[in-house]
Amino acid sequence: MRRKKIMWRIYASFLLSAMTAFAAMAWYATHSLKMFHQDQVAAELLMHAQIVTRETAAILPETEPGTADRLCKEFGRLMTTRITIVLPDGRVIGDSEENPVGMDNHRNRPEIAAALKGETGKAVRFSDTRRQSLMYLAIPVRQGNTLLAVARVSLPLAVIDWAVHAIVRNIILGWLIVAILFAVVTWLLSRRISRPLEDMRRVAERIAHGDLEARVARPDSEELGDLARTLNQMATQLSERLSTITRQRNEQEAVLASMVEGVFAVDRDERILNLNHAAARLLDLAPEQAQGRSIQEAVRNRDLQAFISATLAGTGPAEDEIVIYGNEERFIQLHGTALTNIAGYNIGALIVLNDITRLKRLETVRRDFVANVSHELKTPITALKGCVETLSDTKPIDPVENSRFLAMMARQVARMEALVEDLLSLSRIEFDAERKHVALDRGAISEVLQRAAQSFATAAVAKSISLVVECPAEVKAPINVALLEQAVGNLLDNAIKFSANGTRILVSGRLTGNDVEIQVTDQGLGIEKKHLSRLFERFYRVDQARSRALGGTGLGLAIVKHIALAHRGTVTVASEPGQGSTFTIRIPAR
């Protein structure tokens, strides 16, 4: 069971007792006021009834019909009170608000029955005629000892309720003011008693969280003062003993946190003792969750586990390279050394990790680029060499064969020229983009798309391909018209080459948020998912034989990528085999 604070015990008890007593007093005062007002209204009604009785006795017995009714309506208008005159048999002969002819017999009404007995009748009930609660008072009308009639006056209780409610509102307002004042005073008194204990608790919590400079102000009471002095002495001793340890730990943490290399230490049981943020990032770990766990549980990599085991044994290599497969593939260079204590005993191992993924990828790209360029150049050179050797033969050559070899040489020269032109174009785009020499002027995207589509209209017609351009004229962005037209043209060239006859190619442009999206969608063969991540690399081909047969250099999509980067944008592809492909260029709209 949760224990309550002493302040709340004191505060709640005082406040609840006081508010209960004041609420009871307020209820009693309200009830007394209501009874008082009802007595006042009854006295006022009796005075009105006596006046009506005197005037009614003067006109009864009635000699002219309607005289009593006119008297009631006249007095009712002057007194703002309902007046009714009832004969001893219960018939109503006058009423200040209703036609007496249509009114019920009143002989059995409680106040009328009492008045017929010679008493003053009083009753409070709901009136069906007025649709509200009324107070009725009736007295007999006599002439000598003869009972002529009964005069009844009534007044709505709403008048009483309104007066009582006005007083109740004032009482409630006063009650709230007193309650607030009493709550504040009670709060101050309770805080004066409980504050020293609360201060000690807070200081103890600060000391427990490492704030050893926290001290307690000594209260006035002797017992609490001794407790505060003892707590302050304990904090001083802890501060002196832990300051050195804290300083050394902070220095060590600062060094590890500032290191670019990943560093972590394990004990002889291969449990992680500590690791910095760089190591946690490289190993996809959370630093606070990894400490104390075994390396086999934290990192599922056999090569890393074997390296740590060999380092602890002192027989394995001090350096190694491994590959970690997590959210992305990482190449890690490892350096390991044994940890020893002051006595020289082996207590664990220290592992340093260097991320060499970028270097590995650069080496791969450079190696692939050299191999691809060599391969792309070797093929036409070999063909040209064969043609030259054939044409250089002293034997006579048939004119048809001569023309065939010359055409072959022209094709290979054109292929080499296209390859060199694409390489130079790619190099120029990269050079200008790195030095920000690419001039960007605000222009209409639709005009660029229309010109690119017109350049390939003949090729599309040759394959009966429907080439559609959709782009609102108001879509504009900072662009280099020539480069962007070249990028869209490369995408259209590929779409036409790899689409079947009679299909449809859609070139669209639209504004999406703060970017402009240019999409080229075809209904071609599609591309398998494994190729999508490398599709924009230089000389990367999904189908080597088909791409070369269609005259591609393997640099078209790489050029598209670098043109998008020159526009501070990106290019992506979405494709499924047999469903076609969609290439999307996104560039900032401003």
Image (cartoon, rainbow, N blue to C red):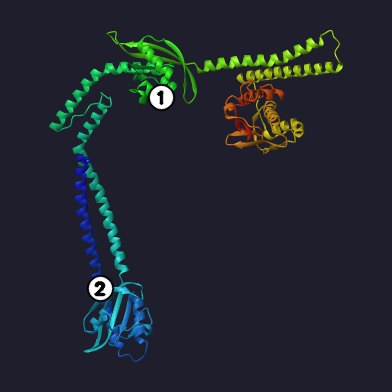
Identify the residue at horizontal 21%, vertical 20% (top origin). Answer: 237
As drawn, 539 above or below 519:
above
Dot 1 or dot 2: first in sequence order is: 2
As drawn, 584 above or below 87:
above
Circle 2 crowding by C-alpha within 10 Å: few under 14, some 14–19, many from 20: many
In the displayed image of the protein, which residue is found farthest to the left? 222
Q: Nearer the viewer, residue 512 or 344?
A: 344
Name the residue type under label 1: Leu
The quadrant the N terminus occupies is top left
Does residue 328 appear anywhere in the picture? yes
The quadrant the C terminus occupies is top right
As drawn, 523 above or below 231:
below
Q: Quadrant of residue 105?
A: bottom left
Circle 1 crowding by C-alpha within 10 Å: few under 14, some 14–19, many from 20: some
Name the residue type under label 2: Ala
Q: Nearer the viewer, residue 321 or 315?
A: 315
**In whole angstroms, how far apart are the C-alphas of marks 1 and 2?**
88 Å
**Disc 2 element:** helix
Q: Nearer the viewer, residue 337 or 304?
A: 304
Q: Is residue 502 left or right of residue 558?
A: right
**Disc 1 element:** loop
Query: Badge 2 is on which residue?
Result: 42
Q: Nearer the viewer, residue 181 or 58?
A: 181
Q: Is residue 304 left or right of residue 23?
A: right
Query: Badge 1 is on which residue?
Result: 285
Q: Quadrant of residue 100?
A: bottom left
Give the image location of residue 486, x and y in percent. 69, 26
Q: Is residue 78 left or right of residue 488?
A: left
Give the image location of residue 63, x and y in percent. 34, 92
Identify the residue at horizontal 21%, vertical 84% (top origin). Answer: 118
Q: Quadrant of residue 515?
A: top right
